[in-house]
């Protein structure tokens, strides 16, 4: 069966998998992926009976964690210098937010530039730390 992990508690080493509106409990002893602990939201394949899952394994892209491809400091620099036109958001792949930043800057006669400055600070401090595809920043 295919499902995704709804919850996982590292203390008790147990979790719940949801598949087709049914829930299956599993224990870490039934986890097959070596070196990668279970995490909430992971897609998994498993063998299920009435209410428990056995032989739980990761599926597809979840075998490896996403690799960083965009640079944090470049995003910060773009936010500071060109934040008023959403350049940092275009760089990170958030196109709709970038267009909204341009609109806000035009509608507020330039005061929308504060939005870009604030986001540059958030990127620098680590509060914005992924691109649009969920990959971490370098």
Image (cartoon, grey):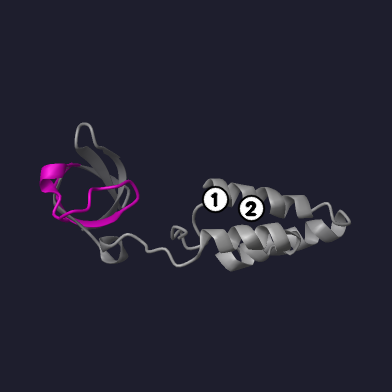
Using the rendered image of the protein, determine whether residue 64 is visible from the camera's viewpoint. Answer: yes
The image shows residue 18, relative to residue 45, as above or below, that is above
Q: Residue 120 got which mark?
A: 2
Which residue shows up at 22% across the image and 53% down it? 36
Report the side of 54 relative to 23 (left or right).
Answer: left
The boundaries of the magenta stretch are: 26-51
Which residue shows up at 31% across the image and 65% down it? 61
Answer few, some or many: residues within 10 Å of disc 1's Cα (few below 14, many 20 plus, some between 14 and 19): some
In percent of width and height, residue 23 lies at 26, 43
Depth check: give the residue in front, 70 or 108: 70
Q: Contact (CB < 8 A) between labels 1 and 2?
A: no
The N terminus: image quadrant: bottom left
| Tally of marks | 2
Which residue shows up at 18% across the image and 54% down it? 35
Which residue shows up at 54% across the image and 50% down it? 128
> Magenta span has 21?
no
Q: Residue 108 got which mark?
A: none
Q: How far is the residue under mark 1 from the one under mark 2?
A: 9 Å
Element under disc 2: helix
In percent of width and height, residue 27 lies at 15, 41
Depth check: give the residue in front, 128 or 47: 128
Depth check: give the residue in front, 19 or 72: 72
> Magenta span has 43?
yes
**Residue pointed to by mark 1:** 128
């Amino acid at each position: 069966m295919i499902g995704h992990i709804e919850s996982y508690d590292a203390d008790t080493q147990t979790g719940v998998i949801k598949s087709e509106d049914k829930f299956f409990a599993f224990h870490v002893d039934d986890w097959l992926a070596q070196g990668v602990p279970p995490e909430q939201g992971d897609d998994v394949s498993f063998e299920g009976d009435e209410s428990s899952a056995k032989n739980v394994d990761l599926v597809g892209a979840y075998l490896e964690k996403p690799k960083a491809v965009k640079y944090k400091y470049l995003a910060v620099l773009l936010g500071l210098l060109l934040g008023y036109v959403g350049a940092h958001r275009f760089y990170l792949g958030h196109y709709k937010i970038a267009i909204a930043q341009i609109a806000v800057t035009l509608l507020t006669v330039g005061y929308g530039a504060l939005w870009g400055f604030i986001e540059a600070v958030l990127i620098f401090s680590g509060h914005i730390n992924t691109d649009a595809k969920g990959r971490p920043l370098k």
